[in-house]
Image: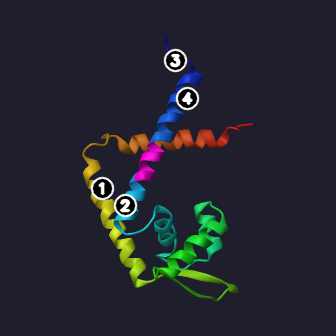
């Protein structure tokens, strides 16, 4: 007997969730290779090209400002980032990486490249097509009211 549409969607959702967990685990391992957590790595990545406020980092990541504030404070305390004056706002300082933070980002990038090179030969050859299909599913899911 062929699975129902509901069952097919549930299996698909479970596989996507499992893939998300696996990719998150890879991200944690990449960050750990640089002496960081995945959260700290993500925060540093947001400010590597241009200093940003905590509110701007939170908005870009779609997370709560308070969590980013704790992460940023930890990065500063550990010498991976620093606060600089914000010419647009007296009280909202900008977060910027230090040299140590940039070295950690480079180490994470090296670890990521190494993982990609190991995984590349085992991944499906039609990865770009698969990504396009996943994007189409994501757009449909985002457009359907869950209530």
Which one is in front in this view, the residue at disc 2 or the one at disc 1?
2
Q: Are marks 2 and 1 in contact (CB under 8 Å)?
A: yes
Q: Is residue 33 in the magenta section?
A: no
Q: Earlier in the sequence, mark 2 or mark 4?
A: 4
Q: Earlier in the sequence, mark 3 or mark 2?
A: 3
36 vs 46, nearest the viewer: 36
Density class for disc 2 (Cα within 10 Å; few <14, some 14-19, many ≥20) is: many
SS for tag 4? helix
Farthest top residue in view: 1
Residue 36, horizontal then vertical, whole percent = 42, 68
Q: Do the residues labelled 1 and 4 touch (CB within 8 Å)?
A: no
How many angstroms separate mark 3 from mark 2 (CA)? 38 Å
Point 70% across, 37% down: residue: 146
Left or right, 116 with reference to 17: left
Which one is in front in this view, the residue at disc 3 or the one at disc 2?
2
Point 52% across, 81% down: residue: 76
The residue carrying mark 4 is: 9
Disc marking residue 115: 1
How many angstroms separate mark 2 from mark 4 (CA)? 31 Å
Q: Earlier in the sequence, mark 2 or mark 1?
A: 2
Point 47% across, 76% down: residue: 49
The residue carrying mark 3 is: 3
Q: Give the range drawn in magenta.
A: 19-25
SS for tag 1? helix
SS for tag 2? helix
The residue carrying mark 2 is: 30
How many angstroms separate mark 3 from mark 1 (CA)? 36 Å
Residue 28, horizontal then vertical, whole percent = 42, 58
Secondary structure mainly formed by the magenta segment: helix
């Amino acid at each position: 007997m062929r699975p129902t549409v509901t069952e097919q969607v549930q299996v698909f959702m479970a596989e996507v969730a499992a893939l998300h967990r696996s990719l998150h685990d890879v991200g944690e391992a990449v960050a750990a290779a640089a002496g960081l957590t995945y959260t700290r790595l993500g925060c540093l990545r947001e400010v590597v090209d241009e200093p940003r406020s905590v509110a701007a980092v939170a908005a870009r990541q779609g997370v709560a400002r308070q969590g980013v504030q704790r992460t940023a404070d930890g990065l500063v305390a550990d010498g991976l980032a620093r606060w600089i004056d914000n010419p647009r706002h007296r009280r909202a300082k900008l977060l910027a990486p230090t040299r140590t933070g940039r070295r950690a980002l480079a180490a994470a990038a090296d670890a990521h490249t190494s993982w990609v090179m190991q995984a590349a030969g085992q991944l499906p050859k039609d990865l770009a097509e698969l990504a396009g299909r996943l994007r189409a599913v994501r757009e449909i899911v985002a457009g359907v009211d869950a209530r």
